[in-house]
Image (tube, rainbow, N blue to C red):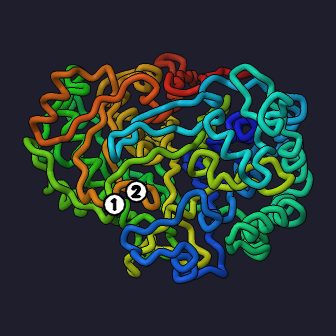
Amino acid sequence: MAAAAVLNLVDPSMTGIGGDAFALFYNSKEKKVHALNGSGRSAESATLDDICRDLSITDRVYGAIPTSSALSVTVPGAAAAWTDIVQHFGSGALSLAEVFAPAIELAENGCPISEIASYYVRIPKFASHQVADRFQWAATEDELRSKPNGTELLKQDPSAPQGYRAPRAGELYRNPLLAATFRRLAEDGKAGFYEGPVAEAIVKVVKDLGGYLNMSDLQRHGAQGSEVVDPVSIRLQQTSPGSPSGGVAVNLWEHPPNGQGIVAQMALGILQILEKQGKIPVFGSNDHNSPEYLHALVEALRIAFADGTWFITDPHAAGFNTESLLSDEYLTERAKLYDPKQAATILDRGSPAFKTSDTIYLAVTDQEGNACSFVNSVADTFGSRIVPPGVGFVLQSRGAGFHLHPANHPNVYAPGKRPYNTIIPAMVTNSNDGSLHTVLGVMGGAMQPQGHAQVLLNMLKFNMNPQVALDAPRICIGVSLPGKSTDPSKKVDNTVYLEEGIGEDVANALAGMGHEVKMVTGMGRALFGRGQVIRVHHDPVGGERIYSAGSDMRGDGAAAPLT
């Protein structure tokens, strides 16, 4: 949580206390994985009709809540998540004041900003194949200057327009207002955020811009706190050519909905069933990123997303047990859609345009064998771009993740409801004894479950170490995420985006199977997400625990052993 707070300071376009957070925690003594849902809800006082009227939406089929609208702002869940994680999973050796002290010191005295956090990147706009901006700090400074209180997230510079600009790589950035917010949280716990000056500032700016959040919404979340829930798992029997019968079994753990982790589990489960049925081969090291392997992966992901974008929502509003989607019976039925020679037409419930989101991920282990898999996000770049006065952070736009149609859609907007949430932490345990195997996560909207599947298969099936597993070229399929469609006229998307490093012969083979293939190079590779991995090993003689780790070359992260 100390690292999460610092990342709010140095990478506010991606993350912060104004967003949501999810966590998985592995207790080494219990050999058990716990989960914490730190996502917030929509305003209790706004109905679906209110939202559509205020946005002048008459066609709810393709209508969406804009990410820059105050109507996209849901209750920020991160503040409660940070404090609750310390309370539920911490050792008790540190107070909240000690946990947040480094972030407070850096926010007051200054911290240098990294290249990617400050960078102005241009990537393809994949729906129309034009060029669009990937908004980072430098590219968003004009918009922040135009927003109420937006200059609070910029660096003071008398030579800049209006005296403010984005910090450039290597420059010191200070945010004393954020330090004051952290200090309130450290001193007063959740009440320091969900009551008093911070809560009043959130409500004021949202209401001034036409939103519906009330003090009661914030106070209710602060009183209830985050929700400790049971994680969901799927058993994966990993085999490779020449391996002993049955291979090695692991359990992949994901946070349950309203996160999208079950998409990764469904895709991997479908691949496992296809392998058992002999419809795909037992892929070995020579098959990595081959046309046959990528075709199977793409089709399994398409099936999983078709279900996920319909069923994933607030579990309290779903009306059914989403874990049933992971049963062998259900996955076997869905696997019937797979065609080994041709890209199948798998209709989902919306437009298939892909859009990235903005998120940070942390993997942490300790000397006792405990681990935390943690993800925090403001949903879009600088979230809603709405900054409450005097607090030093931006509010998330997670409410854009609601559907507005049809009325029976599990994820349709409703008062006091959690929307579909893209952020997902993951863990892997050994099935035989429950010991920790891997802590992992990959950031980036719909890329997250795709990244989980690819990085995990790289390690389990293709015997890659964590760094190589992250560095290996990835694929990304076009996916319709709630609130992120940009091309409502396109009903089906067979596009597969291939990262440079995957051969032209592979691209041609996939095209021959009916996939629309697009190569992505340079800084556009941000599309494929950013991951972190910690792998657990044990010395075969003495049994000592040994960690190895990797950090994605596509981001600013690092694998850092600390004592």
- Is 90 located above or below residue 189 in the figure? above
Q: Secondary structure at mark 1?
A: loop
Question: Quadrant of residue 405 in the image?
Answer: bottom left
Q: Which percent across, then down, holds residue 520?
A: 35, 29
- Is 304 located above or below residue 367 in the figure? below
The residue under label 1 is 488
Q: Nearer the viewer, residue 348 or 227?
A: 348
Extreme top residue here? 541
Q: Secondary structure at mark 2?
A: loop
Label 1: few (<14), some (14–19) or many (≥20) C-alpha neighbours in 10 Å: some
**As drawn, is 475 to the left or to the right of 505?**
right
Q: Cα distance, mark 2 to mark 1?
A: 7 Å
Question: Quadrant of residue 512 in the image?
Answer: top left
Q: Which percent across, then down, holds residue 245?
A: 20, 34
Amino acid carrying label 2: it is: Ser
Q: Is residue 537 visible?
A: no
Q: Nearer the viewer, residue 432 or 319?
A: 319
- Is 509 located above or below residue 406 in the figure? above
Q: Are marks 2 and 1 in contact (CB under 8 Å)?
A: yes
Amino acid carrying label 1: it is: Pro
Please tell me which residue is depicted at 37% across the width and 28% down the height of the picture: 459
Label 2: few (<14), some (14–19) or many (≥20) C-alpha neighbours in 10 Å: many
Q: Which percent across, then down, holds residue 476?
A: 34, 39
**As drawn, is 109 to the left or to the right of 86?**
right
Question: Quadrant of residue 260 in the image?
Answer: bottom left
**As drawn, is 246 to the left or to the right of 362?**
left
Instruction: Indicate which disc residue 131 carries.
Output: none
The residue under label 2 is 485
Please tell me which residue is depicted at 51% across the width and 46% down the height of the picture: 357
Q: In which quadrant will I find the C terminus? A: top right
Q: Nearer the viewer, residue 284 or 20?
A: 20
